[in-house]
Amino acid sequence: MGMTDVLIVGAGPTGLVLACDLARRGAAVRIVDRSPVPPRTSRAKGPNARSLEILDDLGVAEEVLAAGSAPLPMLKYRDRLPVAETDPWADSAPSPDAPYDRGRLIAQWRLEEILRDRLAGYGVRVELGREVTGLAEGPGGRHVDVTFAEGRTERARYVVGCDGAHSSVRKLLGIGFEGTTAEDQVMVCGDVDLADGALDRTRWHQWFDEDGTVMLCPIPGTRTGWWFQAGPERDGRGRPLAPTADGFRRLLARHTGLPGRALTRAELLSTYRVNVRMADRFRAGRVFLAGDAAHVHAVAGGLGMNTGIQDAFNLGWKLGLALAGHAGPELLDTYEEERLPVAARTLDLTSERLRATLEAIRRPGGGLDAAITPDTTGLGVGYRWSSLARGHAAAPKAGDGSPEAPDAEVRTARDGERPVPRPGDRAPDAPCVDAVTGARTRLHRVFAGPRTTVLGFGPGSAAALREVAAAYGDAGVRICRVYAAHEDRAASAPGEAVVDDEGHAAAAYGRGASDGTGTGTSTVVVVRPDHHLGLSAPAADTRSVHAYLHRLHGAARSAERFSGIGGRRR
């Protein structure tokens, strides 16, 4: 019986992102889905800013941007008349440390097509019509035996359930999924076609009346396609009716004033109820849960698909290092350690945004913009409490030394200065120049791909970077010297090098010290493969750098190169 490295169950965005990440690492990955055709749903409207960074890393962001559209202004109506227009992103703009300041509208099925094509480029295709019916740990806990509905049993070193809120994987593991379902908070959804010219396609139209709601958002890449969301029709006893094309036509005519015949097609019809639930744990031995299989919450803020994509990006590099034999199994424990608190916070955030939205739409002019806050971009999510968030040997954690709570992830500025990222935070981007070619680039392009990155700021970092290259250059670690514009680059360190010609990198990382003076201000920053800071330390503290890289990549090839005590090398 052959052995697969990772079997992914569920081929939605979460499973596909994880499969792409593992495939590019050279893992033997398979992805199955019980649907006989590629699954299609209508709810998710696209990646947020943080997910766009992940898609950029996977090499598909340009295609996603081309296939989608920018978020649209929201036109709100009451009693069929327009009463207000709001652009939630009017005051937002890209910045040097975050070139994606907003998400992108794209149909989920189109995003999945792009990811499936990317995955096919690695020689991996979704195996459709395959339902998992049994999971059993193999002898010695070294693999998982997976049984399928057709009776076959296959083996995998790891299994990841990305199979949605009704996850078979979670149920087979007996993992609880506690929470609540709000039976009175119901919405009907679908993809529809409207007669050409029926509505302005440069707006997201929202009718909020006392007796019901209709929302219509144009689907990018289509001429007449729209996302349709509405409060349901109800029977004589007040119970919601199942969605139908004729029901959508009646809702359209009642609230918008458009004739029902203007709706010419309706498909992917579904009923949505607000579920707020989270799995008791995200791991059972060699089996993991990600995306809706691990957590579901209110749609307010559009964080459902995005939280799943970010689960996948957190788990992929850890599985990759474990499979390659670099990291021990304890690295896999940090997936639940980091993502479960984020999921819990997301449940709270989306519930609060739903409450704010329901309150807003009671008033004429209120709308879905009430659900959008800086938190919904995903750019502020970090893991300062994680065991992978480490200061250098001489720098204890803030406060009393205990791990910080998840809410501490939001960075705050002091004395009007730009907030400085700390271990666990998302690593800022910054425009810069390739020191060899002179071409414009940016730090996230340097980070791209399945490797850990070690940045060196200041002349004193060159020796530390050379040691890292010698010890870990063959173990998935890249180094990059970040030069200030006026620094002498004659004696460059090995590996990549960029010039911080406008000072954005130094500002983003709080390294005003990269001034070329060599006065003890040089710093080494370790960036995890998922673009989060792992360690920031003085360049002389090679002991801390070695200890951190050892945690991720195992023993150094030349351990004696890091034999310093307290930062002094022999």
Image (spheres, rainbow, N blue to C red):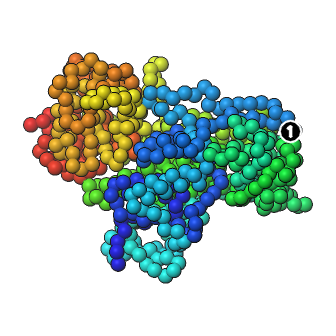
Residue 98 drawn at (x, y percent): 47, 32
The residue that mark 1 highlights is 80
Furthest toward the left, the residue is 570
507 lies left or right of 569: right
230 lies left or right of 222: right
Q: Residue at x 31, y 30 (%)?
A: 434
Residue 298 drawn at (x, y percent): 65, 49
Q: Quadrant of the N terminus?
A: bottom left
SS under mark 1:
loop
Visible residue check, residue 453: yes
- Badge 1, how many Cα within 10 Å: few under 14, some, many 20+? some
Q: Quadrant of residue 92?
A: top right
Q: Residue at x 52, y 75 (%)?
A: 133
Q: Quadrant of the C terminus?
A: top left
Front residue of 343 and 192: 192
Q: Is residue 482 above or below residue 36?
A: above
Residue 319 drawn at (x, y percent): 36, 57
